[in-house]
Image (cartoon, grey):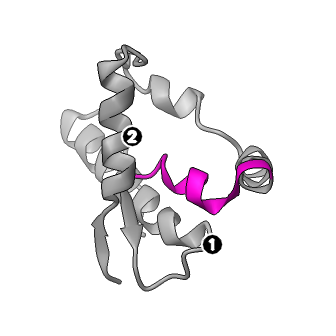
Amino acid sequence: MAVKLNRTAYAYAQELVRAGKVVADDRDAWSEHQPSTAEENEFVRQHGFAEYARWHLGVDDSEPSDTKRRHLSIQEACAHLHGMIEAIRGDVTPAHAP
């Protein structure tokens, strides 16, 4: 796995922040607003993988660019790290690593 920063997504995120299009995240609020697999698939169908990629700060170069898998391993890794942090705080038991 060759994980790297998706500079296009990072620039897009900075653009959104500068435009004030952000929400200060409360504890675990992001998970409540995470799209379902069906919603992601519909987004890709309507907008394509290039637009889908703009919402992911990391990409896995070992996966094809026209697949959601290219971004999923990053998402899984982030979720695992979040679980580890919560476990240290005593909130939850950590999930298995991706």
Answer with left or right where residue 42 lies relative to residue 4. right
The magenta region covers 46-56
Amino acid type, residue under disc 1 in the picture = Thr
Q: Distance of mark 2 from mark 1, alpha carbons? A: 20 Å
Residue marked by disc 1: 67
| Relative image position of residue 9 (x, y in whole percent) | 39, 49
Question: Which residue is located at x 42 percent, y 70 percent?
Answer: 98
- Contact (CB < 8 A) between labels 2 and 1? no
Answer with left or right where residue 69 lies relative to residue 98. right
Task: Name above or below for residue 65 compared with residue 59.
Answer: below
* Disc number placed over residue 37 in the picture, else none: none
* Disc number placed over residue 12 in the picture, else none: 2
**SS category of the residue bearing label 1:** loop
Task: Name above or below for residue 15 compared with residue 19.
Answer: below
Q: Which residue is at the front of the view, 69 or 14?
A: 14
Q: Could one spot residue 57 in this view of the protein? A: no
